[in-house]
Image (cartoon, coloured by chain):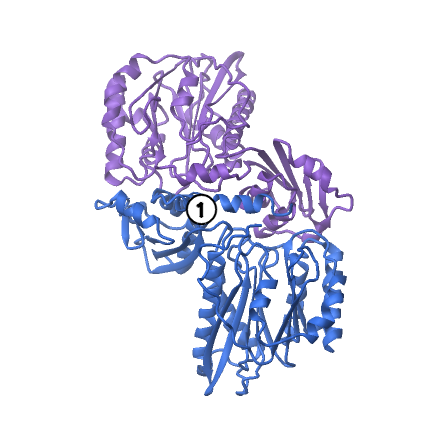
Chain colours: A blue, B purple
Amino acid sequence: MSSAVSPLAPKSLPSLPGVAGVKLATAEAGIRYAGRTDVLLASFAPGTAVAGVFTKSRCPSAPVEWCRERLGGGRIRALVVNSGNANAFTGANGRAATKLTAELAAKALGCSEDEIFLASTGVIGEPLDATKFGAVMGSLVARGEEGAWEAAARAIMTTDTFPKLATRTAEIGGRTVTINGIAKGAGMIAPDMATMLAFVATDAAIAPDALQAILAGAAERSFNCVTVDGDTSTSDTLLAFATGAAGHPEISDPSDPALTGFAAAFESLLVELAQFVARDGEGARKFVTVEVAGAESDASARKIALSIANSPLVKTAIAGEDANWGRVVMAVGKAGEPADRDLLSIRFGDLRVAHRGARDPDYDEATASAYMKREEIVIGVDLGLGQGKARVWTCDLTEGYISINADYRS
Amino acid sequence: MSSAVSPLAPKSLPSLPGVAGVKLATAEAGIRYAGRTDVLLASFAPGTAVAGVFTKSRCPSAPVEWCRERLGGGRIRALVVNSGNANAFTGANGRAATKLTAELAAKALGCSEDEIFLASTGVIGEPLDATKFGAVMGSLVARGEEGAWEAAARAIMTTDTFPKLATRTAEIGGRTVTINGIAKGAGMIAPDMATMLAFVATDAAIAPDALQAILAGAAERSFNCVTVDGDTSTSDTLLAFATGAAGHPEISDPSDPALTGFAAAFESLLVELAQFVARDGEGARKFVTVEVAGAESDASARKIALSIANSPLVKTAIAGEDANWGRVVMAVGKAGEPADRDLLSIRFGDLRVAHRGARDPDYDEATASAYMKREEIVIGVDLGLGQGKARVWTCDLTEGYISINADYRS
């Protein structure tokens, strides 16, 4: 694992306020790592609403299946997250481990195991020894506090080089509510969905179905717009929790005008967390925004944007600070979406490098090369066909990605 | 560009016999490279049949469009190939460059420009100065010889570390015919199609439509089963030529039993060339075969095989000699094809590492690690669902790929 912090990390970590109704504690359960925390318990006030979005992998982890089966209940009392072992492709052992973990938490909190949600991240295929959670569960419950957000974000890291935290406030019915979020993820990251793990809690009072609707929409425009390597994890999990402690009447209609500001703040927080993931892409040295316009539809624009953002040749060119826009042409061409080479324009930032099927007459290699030296690169593509547009975030592909991933297990 | 020869290259180059009716010559036109040949002229006896398969990119190069428009004619007198510049995304200039190149060759050979086929490989988006071909065209025609296959293979290389040549013989109507092929390609390689450039010539007498049918089928099971980085070039071109000089009556039905042996030899040659491409994958140190069985259909198996073969995480694990079969599970899961985690089995070579949704009870890390140190790795997946199967070839993903591609243009 890499130890140096990504050069694209935020310069300082935000200090998150507490969210009334949420208590956090972390511990060293010794799942895989030594000398660092690797388990997080978030406990919630009774009646807290829960919503979730999960990986679309056909081979999901045991915790993903556990959560999916319980999401319909709509309420949560605790979330247990461990790093170091994904509890994925672990067969009957994996299912037993999820059940044991939930039982341990339910017993410690005095609630039903169906109100316990789980997430695991780390190596796939290794049996997870959930008995290790037993040794720390009582202490996790006893030590829970509202302010431990940074510790929580650190406990769920794997190859992440910095903890990912964000906070927002919004007004609902005259009350100020808080939204806090944490995320982890740096590799095995692609849309559908790109999350790895992310957890967002608010003291707003929002019914589960409404929370689910807000979460699903915001995830589509945030985590599902970020890619590092095009690889979709078995374990991607994004959960949202609404404790209701802010005290306004519970809102059950997601299109209630009272939620407008909240939904915007919520999505903005998810975008910030998602961008952190691209900024912490394994080996990343540059943060890349791909903007596609003029496509036949938004869906088509999105496929083209992802084709560019996932292209190893585009990503290595960016790593090499090479204004190789020809590879952007290649990536547009291979997306399989409607495109007319002779209408296509490409820009790096505000610098148009190709126009209507050929290099821009004003193209200047020195200017383009100077732009590529920046830490944040925008690749813009205009297909000239229609009104469809999309924006995705990614990072460059460097030797660091290879070295991190060539020996991840060893 | 890398200068060291891939460790996966064949230990020696085959010596190719001549193909009656085909003359080859190479020259230094100074397109981009200094001190090496960069243009190939292959001239053919009058009446030579031609067949072709091209990139599915929506942004194809000017030479690809040129060839597509002329393929219907079915006959070829000469092929002009240059390396160093792809003449792709070059707009009107690119179309003018193809026309000028064809005119120069047609004039030198005394034939119609519609019987001239073209291919270009190299940087995208740079204008190609086709006047440079004028200076060498007369000499290329004058110096053509039957035996210059290795020189031909070398002239079309870009980031290739070794020339790619193969030869076969077959019997048609009691006559022995020769099939020779050359290819180039090491990056920007993915199916649909994976070729980059490949040219196959035979002295058999086969009508254009029959040659096209044989070529299309064989390409599907060879070049379209190889991937290096999932990036599809704008310029992929696979052409086949049948001079008829062997003297047997021309065959016009691709299912004529007289062609059975020929078709098998032809496909075997394409497979060898396609595997050379994976063996020369940029930065490759390991040759990887992915075999998928038990899928719902062959098409589904193929999508899953490509998902594995294109996964950066699988490929970096192989580079790191890490038996990280969990990433194979991930890649199966993300393919989006029917899969049941609890029926899935995975093997490395003959070593079953995962069975029915969990690590194999007999799994031994030391044995698996020892296997991963081999130069040739087989990843086998059995989905346990049906009879669909597929096999694709790829290579590992190493720091070498990054360094080659980060500064390709500079």
Kind of element beneath mark 1: loop
Q: Is residue B313 visible?
A: no
Q: Determine which quarter of the picture holds residue B350.
A: top right
Q: Residue at x 59, y 35 (%)?
A: B288
Q: Residue furthest front?
A: A35
The answer to whether A166 is drawn above or below residue A338 in the figure is below
The C terminus of chain A, quarter of image:
top right
Tell me what residue is drawn at x 50 percent, y 72 percent.
Answer: A15
Vertical position of residue B265 compared to residue A3: above or below: above
Q: Amino acid at mark 1?
A: Ser
Q: Give the percent coordinates (x, y) of residue B1.
A: 41, 32
Query: Residue A38's spot in the image, x, y percent?
Result: 65, 61
The answer to which quarter of the image holds residue B66 is top left
Q: B13 or B212, which is in the foreground?
A: B13
Which residue is painted at 73% across and 37% down in the image?
B367
Q: Residues within 10 Å of mark 1 (few under 14, many from 20)?
A: many
Q: Which quadrant holds residue B247?
A: top left
Indicate the position of residue B177 as horizontal and vertical percent values.
50, 15
User: Relative to the observer, which residue lies in front, B253 or B76?
Assistant: B76
